[in-house]
Image: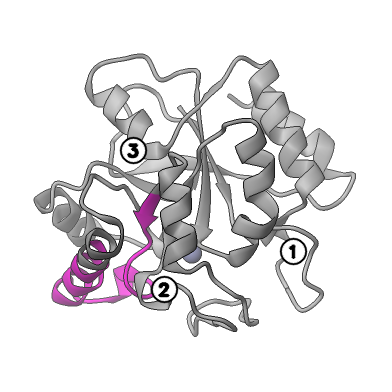
Amino acid sequence: MLILNYHRVGPVDPRARYRGMFVSQSHLLFQVELLRLLGYQFCTVIDAVQKKQRGEKTVKLACLTFDDGYLDNFNCGLSILRARTIPATVYVVTKDVGKKNVTWSEAGDSYPSDLMDWDQLRLLQDLGWEIGSHAHDHVHLARRSASAQELLIGESYHVLSEKLGPGPRTFAYPYGSYNQETIALLRNMNCPGAVTIQEGVNEDSAHGLELKRIAMRGYSWRHYPKALQKLVWKP
Ligand SMILES: [Zn+2]
């Protein structure tokens, strides 16, 4: 299973220090059409994880994931994916859903961004998207005590089921930060799956709470061959 990692969709914000956070609409279109040509089937992370648990082959599954729940995913990304009936997974920071001009103090690239609200997330869910958890606050979990981690993860799942209804949802570690206590917590909560920022492809035997992703970017012509390299040759 191939899990692609995106953040912002649309033109690069000139205030952004890490432009790799952005994928333009034309690059997103190129990347999904390339995956389709390669014979991949698109599904959400929860669907892929459940297929894996049932022992089905996941080698030709591609999951698009969008971290943080940026408003531009809705305004710029949705139309491209909806026209091709491609579902995706969005990982939201539950305490900040619907907020404008959000910055996270532990982020190196801290400039204000607008986030999707619950109505927009509900619409995505109705279209078959998965709204997963990115914890209740965007912090490094590995730097927190086990009890603090439990609050951050537990509250996030509580809010998600209250706002969007019950159902299994996967988790994305903010900043890719986690430790053995995080894994133990998620296992105790029967969390169905969790994605990291470790670069790579997941074999059918992959650990369900340490799934790898491929960080995708695309805002310059140089990223077309890079996308080819990442999606065609690397796996
Ligand atoms: Zn994040």
Q: Position of residue 212 (x, y in %)?
A: 44, 40
Q: CA distance from mark 1 to mark 2?
A: 19 Å
Could you tell me the amino acid type at mark 2? His
> Which of labels 1 and 3 is toward the front?
3
Q: Which residues are magenta?
A: 131-157
Q: Position of residue 172 (x, y in %)?
A: 38, 54
Could you tell me the amino acid type at mark 3? Ile
Residue 145 position by quadrant: bottom left
Question: Residue under circle 1?
Answer: 19
> Counting other residues with Cα less than 10 Å from the Cα at mark 3, is it few (<14), some (14-19), or many (20 or more)?
many
Q: Position of residue 27 (x, y in %)?
A: 78, 43
Residue 81 position by quadrant: top right
Question: Residue under circle 2?
Answer: 138
As rendered, which of 144 and 163 lies closer to the eye?
163
Q: Residue at x 31, y 23 (%)?
A: 51
Ligand 1 closer than 8 Å to label 3 CB: no
Could you tell me the amino acid type at mark 1? Arg
Of mark 2 and mark 3, the one earlier in the sequence is 3
Check the image and name the residue furthest to the right.
221
Ligand 1 closer than 8 Å to label 2 CB: yes
The answer to whether 204 is drawn above or below residue 23 in the figure is above
Q: Residue at x 62, y 48 (%)?
A: 78
Q: Residue at x 76, y 48 (%)?
A: 25
Question: Residue under circle 3?
Answer: 46
Of mark 1 and mark 2, the one earlier in the sequence is 1
The answer to whether 143 is drawn above or below residue 221 in the figure is below
Q: Position of residue 214 (x, y in %)?
A: 56, 41
As rendered, which of 45 and 174 lies closer to the eye?
45
Q: CA distance from mark 2 to mark 3?
A: 21 Å
Position of the N terminus, as image quadrant, is top left
